[in-house]
Image (tube, coloured by chain):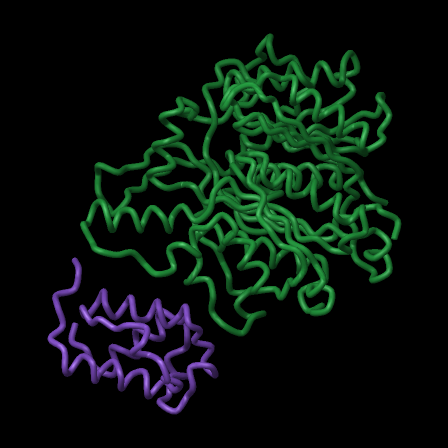
Amino acid sequence: MAIDRNSVLDIIAEEALIDPAKLTPEATLESLGIASLDIISIVFALEEKFGLALEQSDLEGVQSLGQLVDLILDRASVEQPHAPNP
Amino acid sequence: MTGRVAVTGLGCVSGLGQGMAATWAGLTDGRGGVRMLSRRLGDDPRFAMEGPAAFVESVDGSALEAHLGRRVMGQLDPVCAYAVVATHEALTDAGLLDQTALLGDAAILYGGASGGNVTIEESYARLFLKGQAGVHPLTIPKYMASAAVGQISMLFGVKGMAYAIASACASSAHAIAEAMHLVRAGRSKIVIAGGADASLTFGSWTAWKALRAMAPDACRPFSSERKGMVLGEGAATLVLEDLDHARARGATIHAEVIGAGASSDAFDLTQPDGVGATKAMAQARADAGIRLDEPCLISAHGTGTPLNDKMEAQALGEVFGRDLERHCVIATKSAHGHLLGAGGAIEFVAGLGALKAGLAPPILNYLGPDPDCVLPLALGPPCSISHEVLVSNSFAFGGMNSVLVARRFG
């Protein structure tokens, strides 16, 4: 599974139990009800599916969904993701 | 406040089905909720669970999610899923779901023999079977023994005192007893009490088998040829409320909780001595202030294990003496299996249903009398009863005993 904007949004919708139609770039994490524990679950799922490593500190200052997705895609483009766990 | 304690809300889920109506139908239709379980951990034939169990096929959280306006069920360990749907039903029944101020002052006392067993087993399987480096970051908050209490508090906005009670298979009975004491003492007008358990995992299944406590076929309380218990899973929630408070807001009152007794055997980790059970029952009767000749509906602990049932029959004989025939003994584990930490609550709820309906749910799978268990058993088909008082027994590993007493209301 290749990482792209849609696949990231799919993971966010699945992990945070949010209707995908509500996932617009300008929506804030707060307005979507994405809490800190949801973020942890999203990051865990990204690690699982794409081998992408994100630290909690990477996420500081992220407020909108667009920022979160851009950060993930930016990190994916500069890192050579390691093989995900089976 | 009178110090009298009303039951104003009921909800449950188990192998009998979801909701009070399905539960009562399953208790009285003679079929029960025990089926053959065939499940594998990770689809690996080395980790197979095969045998009778009263498992929950699925949980419908749509009404809860509609109330909340968001999805939550997919994030929950089964133990929490069972707890919150049962509590949603109980609060709906009590007319409290939208009473923000009342729920804000309410308390929660909820029992469980353990916590999110499915979550912890999945995490261990990742580490030890699949050789993966990490586990899901929410493993701890989903596994902790108080996980269900936290979810009930958050989802329903309950902001009073809230904690979990763990006393193995008496956990939820202890929780209801302490809830009664809280209301009696005027410390809380409304308490959400009950318990949940979801232990049908390969590890738990194997551990119960290791105890030689599981029946290969069926749970047959107090019967000849009984061979042990059958595992179940689920939750039962009650809303306990100060009687005057309930009356003032026009709540439906299902019954009145009038007494409780508790004791410890200080004897053996798994084997009951009977003395503690006798003490708890006598204490509960005295606390309830019921006459010694009051005919009682007795919801027995009735696990179906040879030793436990023999001990309970002896203890009942000691407490109720020569008047034993005046009473009626039900043993609903034969229908919904052993819900472990939730067992006391669902058996109390079953007894309340019997009091209200004037109908004793039959003990299933009975093969014939055991001379060590001479009791006035409710054997099928369901028989009419006119008892006003319920005595509900819960006796746990570690010798922890809890007995609840309720009276039909109105």
Res. B221 in view: yes
Q: Which shade is chain B?
A: green
Please state if B218 lies on the left or on the right of B201 as rendered.
right
| Residue sitting farthest toward the front | A57
| Location of residue B286 by image quarter | top right
Q: Where is residue B392 drawn, in percent x and y? A: 68, 32
Q: How many discs appear?
A: 0
Residue at left 40%, top 46%? B117
How far from the left and from the top, in percent, is residue B82?
A: 51, 52
Chain displayed in purple = A
Q: Is residue B278 above or below residue B288?
A: above
Q: Give the position of the C terminus of chain B as an image quadrant.
A: top right
Residue B21 appears in view: no
**Percent x, y for residue B24?**
62, 43
Residue at the (33%, 79%) spot, across then down? A59
Horizontal placement of A39 versus B108: left or right?
Answer: left
| Front-lying residue, B295 or A24 | A24
Residue placed at 37% from the left, 27% from the top?
Answer: B209
Residue at x-position 47% and y-position 55%: B59
Question: Which residue sits furthest top?
Answer: B371
